[in-house]
Image (cartoon, grey):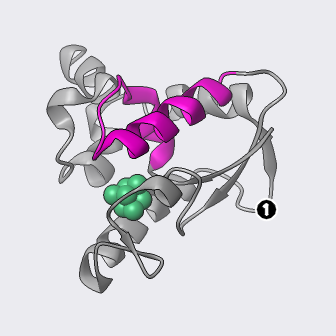
Amino acid sequence: MKLLIRGHHLLCLKGFQGYGYDEAFTENMTEINNLRKLPETTVTLTDSPDDICKACPNLKNDLCVDRTHNERIVKMDGEVLKKFDYEKEYESVELFEKVDSIFNTMERVSEICFNCLWHEKCLFYQKLQNNR
Ligand code: SF4
């Protein structure tokens, strides 16, 4: 299975515990979160709508909400993507191990997660917060 994942969603997937914008979104995110753990799954990275966005009610004309909000999201993606190789097709398990080793302190995610509405529901963010 090949997945297309936008930069900041690497962190969202690590923190996902079954919450989402609506039923279709949550169902799709759950499926992708299961697929990304399989050894045969590969991931290509992007700063555009991905396999998670495609089931999201916030995606309008290929933008996240609107132009202004989308710019903020693309910036978040960029903060993650600068640690990875855009061109590469990653083995998913290896990629998410890298995510754990790179984004392992609150300081390292501060530019990415600080404005996110899902802080209280995100296992990844809460784990870093508890390790402070
Ligand atoms: S459209 Fe926006 S809110 Fe929806 S999944 Fe994509 S980045 Fe997240």
Residue marked by disc 1: 87
Decide if residue 50 is on the left or right side of residue 104: right
- Residue 45, horizontal then vertical, whole percent: 65, 56
Residue 69 at x, y = what percent?
A: 26, 74
Give the extent of the magenta segment: 9-37
Q: Quadrant of residue 68?
A: bottom left
State left or right for residue 55 relative to residue 125. right
- Mark 1 crowdedness (10 Å alpha carbons): few <14, some 14-19, many ≥20: few
Residue at image position (52%, 59%) is 54
Considering only vertical position in the picture, is 27 above or below 55?
above
Q: Depth check: give the residue in front, 98 or 45.
A: 45
Question: Does 125 appear above or below 3?
Answer: above
Point out residue 124 in the picture as x, y percentages from the top left corner. 34, 26
> What residue sits 45% from the left and 28% below the top?
14
Whether residue 123 can be seen here: yes
Residue 11: % across, % down: 43, 38
Q: Is residue 15 magenta?
A: yes
Q: Is residue 119 left or right of residue 108?
A: left
- Which quadrant: the N terminus? top right
Prevailing SS of the magenta stretch: helix
Query: In the visual, does 10 lie left or right of 94?
Result: left
